Image: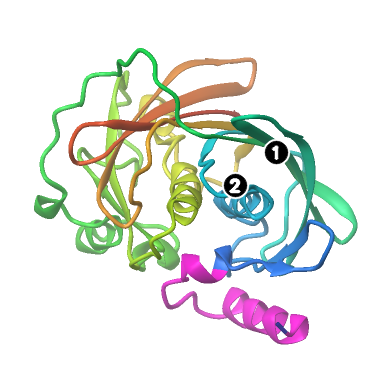
Amino acid sequence: MDDRAGTARVNAVTVGEYEGVPLLRELLDLEALGADRYRGRTQPRPAQRLFGGVLLAQSIAAAGRTVQAGRPVHSLHALFVRGASPAEHVEYSVDRIRDGGSTSARRVIARQGGHEVFSATVSFQRGRGGVRHQKAFPSAPSPETLLSLHERLARDRVDGPDWWKLPRAIDLRHVDDPPYPPRQRPEDVTRHLVWIKTRETLPEDPLIHACALAYASDMTLLEPVMLRHGLDRHAPRLRMASLDHAMWFHQEARSDDWLLYDQDSPVGEDGRVLAQGAVFDPQGRQVATVAQEALLGVG
């Protein structure tokens, strides 16, 4: 892969019109640099910061390259250290912390320009028997009866960046109204449901599907906060940044099939908000759980 050509492509799209649907397969096809080091491409974005879902997905992909077959990923605990640029590649180094009888643990550090921008601990474990229970599968209309977010925004002529009205790597179909535009009368949001699915068909590799789900998990998780407080994420005075992100994978699931993302925000205090979510497959199985804390301030 030619770094100069890749950077030129990124810059060309960033400064020009955001067009086309980025392929997750390309983002997850990391370049091996040797000694458990990898390089990941970034995603063109008309913003100064790289979308955090790229770092989440690529860190799992990098860690998974170092783990023996038969041990699917079961948890991710990540820290966003500083903002990363969408116009530069990201380099990942993997530390093989432990390989036990059934569990493997990896520490992943992501760097840009020699600076650490992100770190994560990723754990892999082969299945075991045990007790079973889960949250109730929420009632929701079929995704086929709902419009994709970009179609909905275009239909309603919502003010905002034009790139929001273009197709994305993840098809988002909100069960209720999305927070675009902000609600005139904010209300307590106890449940925010969004159907999610990759637009492309992914390879028959459970790790790739887990990476894609991690990518998607960061797209709408703060929307319950926006809805509750009537906030406009594009307002000049709004300051928002993810601090950390945790994810637990309970069962293997296809990310190129519809998944229902059940989200809420139980608390906001001292300039920080906590958001959480549960992901269900079409059969009603809870396949993942997500939690994130973020900075959010106005003024």
Picture quarter with the N terminus? bottom right
From this viewpoint, is residue 299 visible? no
> Residue 20: which disc?
none
> Residue 56: which disc?
2
Q: Is 68 situated above or below 240?
A: below
Q: Is 1 situated above or below 259?
A: below
Q: Residue at x 60, y 48 (%)?
A: 60
Q: Is 259 situated above or below 127?
A: below
Looking at the image, do the residues carrying marks 2 and 1 touch, with CB atoms under 8 Å apart? yes
Magenta range: 2-26
Q: Residue at x 63, y 83 (%)?
A: 9
Residue 71, position in %: x, y? Answer: 54, 41
Badge 1 amino acid: Ala
* Residue at which label 1 appears: 120
Crowding around mark 1 (Cα neighbors within 10 Å: few <14, some 14 to 19, many 20+) is many
Q: Secondary structure at mark 1?
A: strand
Which quarter of the figure has residue 284? top left
Q: Secondary structure at mark 2?
A: helix
| Earlier residue among tags 2 and 1 | 2
Q: Is residue 84 magenta?
A: no
